[in-house]
Image (spheres, rainbow, N blue to C red):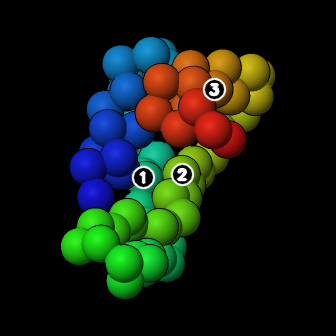
Amino acid sequence: MLKSKSLSTHMSTACRWCRANPEKFTVFIERGGIETTGETPTFVYNYRLVMFVMDYTGDLDNLTLPLIVWLAENQPQL
């Protein structure tokens, strides 16, 4: 479940507002589980990350663009 921390760190680094207001945004796992085929002893975590932002009045692009960069690096299949 390293991706929630990774996204939070990335947004704090890449977005000036997130860096200045760390108490007003959070990243958490809403729900999820483990998926396996049962054929081999491998599995994947499948979960939904939520980025919750409070009292943001700036340009939405300032949040969206860093998020897209993180997604391209960490979830390119989306």
Q: Look at mark 1 in the image and give the residue it sits on.
A: 26
Q: Does residue 54 appear in the picture of this structure?
A: yes
Residue appearing at x 38%, y 27% in the figure: 10
* The N terminus: image quadrant: bottom left
Q: Earlier in the sequence, mark 1 or mark 2?
A: 1
Q: In front: 23, or 14? A: 14
- Give the distance between the C-alpha atoms of the residues marked 3 and 1, in whole angstroms: 17 Å
What residue did someone put label 3 on?
68
Q: Residue 20: x and y, percent?
A: 39, 25
The mark that comes first in sequence, 2 or 3, is 2
Mark 1, residues whose alpha carbon is within 10 Å: few (<14), some, or many (≥20)?
some
Residue 14, percent across and down?
A: 44, 16
Picture residue at 57% right of the left edge, 25% below the top: 72
| Residue type beneath disc 2 | Met
Residue 64's place in the image compared with 32, above or below, is above
Res 11 → quadrant: top left
Task: Report the residue marked by disc 2.
Answer: 51
Q: What element carries label 1?
A: strand
Which tag is nearer the camera, tag 2 or tag 3?
Answer: 3
Relative to residue 54, is residue 73 depicted above or below?
A: above
**Residue 67 showing in the rendered view:** no
Q: Which image quarter holds the C terminus?
A: top right
